[in-house]
Image (cartoon, coloured by chain):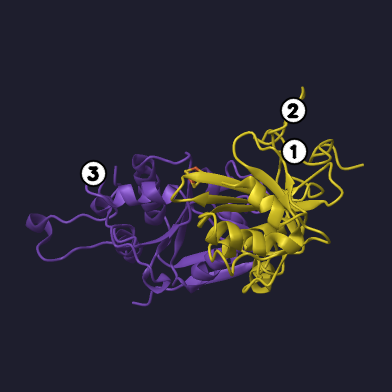
Amino acid sequence: MVKSDFGYNSKVEGEVIVTRADAVVNWVRSHSVWPMPMGLACCAIELMAAGGSRFDISRFGMEVMRFSPRQADCMIVAGTVTYKMAEVVRRIYDQMAEPKWVVAMGACASTGGMYRSYATLQGVDNIVPVDIYISGCPPRPEALLDGMMLLQEKIRQEGGSLKRTFRGRTIETKIVS
Amino acid sequence: MDAAALASRFPATQDLAGKDMPTFRVAGSDLLAAVAYLRDAQGFDLLADLCGVEWKDRPTRFGVVLHLLSTTHKEYVRLHVDAVDDRVPSVSSLHPGANWHEREAYDMFGIVFEGHPDPRRILMWESYPYHPLRKDFPLAGIEVELPAADVAEVTGKKVVPAPMMGGPFVSHGGKLSEGEPTALDQSWNEQHPKA
Ligand code: SF4
């Protein structure tokens, strides 16, 4: 499944690996996505299940749930985002260092779900840019893992020098070598 | 539970002939004394619930309903209080558990609990201008600013009425049961604006 941009065969190449900087950076990034578990409702229970031994999210380098946004790469919004909580979600997103990704886990985070209500934000993409949407109410842990693997795929295809725009603002991350 | 004792102590008490448990309407001015009497003399030592109600057929629009449980006699009693001028005395000095229930009734209905130690909203944010469980509040909500000005500025978003069409709270015609969540005026939605 992994389309390698780099290869290493010690018999042929000795001690030297030749590749592109982007490929290395993306390889590193995609295999150490430390999540910020933004568990807001029932979906968080499935997020916890994904961390347990049966589903074992650590197979993908994502078991390091970081409760400090400074140390996290990917915010997994698992649950119902109320308007009151939206401010907190946005603020935590702002505190995460670039490059950063957001996964909307479940119907509520993606669209507001069944909460068509005066109190519920109708999709977390109203306030933060979302990379992956996962359907389900709640999604099973397999669905979360599938979504996270899609995110890895997306990360692998990004330019190493990240340039992202969100509502008119351009955010650039440069690789200095 | 000695219903007569309650009625004789508090003459304004009305027996509502509850089908499932003894039910009384007490005057707001008697509420604290009645709850204290029930707690200390009759053993109703646990406040099981306290909630606000909007009545459609009573002269006082809002009321409060309390459920008290006796943990020794395994009995409930229910008290109704009318919120005259939307005000009811707070019972949180007698039952500390009433504190958050009263904040919720204030948040959702705008009933003011006099003497409450911490009269803030509990679910909606403090600057929210409406009381959402009132019957004249549309199910979808009303547009207001986001609670945080900086988030509103960077995202350009507001609190907007939720799309109700096809949602679980929109009836597809026919007769609504009394128990179904309804607003006063259901004739409009995002496809048919309010006239
Ligand atoms: S999508 Fe379903 S399971 Fe997930 S938070 Fe919403 S209601 Fe709960």
What amino acid type is highlighted by mark number 1? Answer: Thr
Dots 3, 1 in contact, CB < 8 A: no
Residue B15, picture quadrant: top right
Numbered mark located on residue A49 in the image: none
Q: Secondary structure at mark 3?
A: loop
Subunit ID for the residue under disc 2: B
Q: Residues within 10 Å of mark 2 (few under 14, many from 20)?
A: few
Picture layout, residue B15 above or below residue B146: above
Q: Is B4 situated left or right of A133 in this image?
A: right
Image position, residue B42 (x, y; %) = 54, 54
Question: How far apart are the alpha carbons under marks 2 and 1?
Answer: 9 Å
- The residue closer to the viewer here, B16 or A24, is B16
Subunit ID for the residue under disc 1: B
Sequence-earlier tag: 2 or 1 = 2
Q: Which residue is mark 2?
A: B176
Q: Which residue is mark 1?
A: B182
The chain coloured purple carries which letter? A
What amino acid type is highlighted by mark number 2? Answer: Leu
Q: Residue at x 77, y 24 (%)?
A: B173
Image position, residue A67 (x, y; %) = 38, 68
On the same chain, marks 3 and 1? The answer is no
Subunit ID for the residue under disc 3: A
Figure quadrant of the N terminus of chain A: top left
Q: Residue at x 40, y 74 (%)?
A: A70
The chain coloured yellow carries which letter? B
Tell me: is circle 3 under 8 Å from ligand 1.
Answer: no
Tell me: is circle 1 under 8 Å from ligand 1.
Answer: no
Question: How far apart are the alpha carbons under marks 3 and 2?
Answer: 46 Å
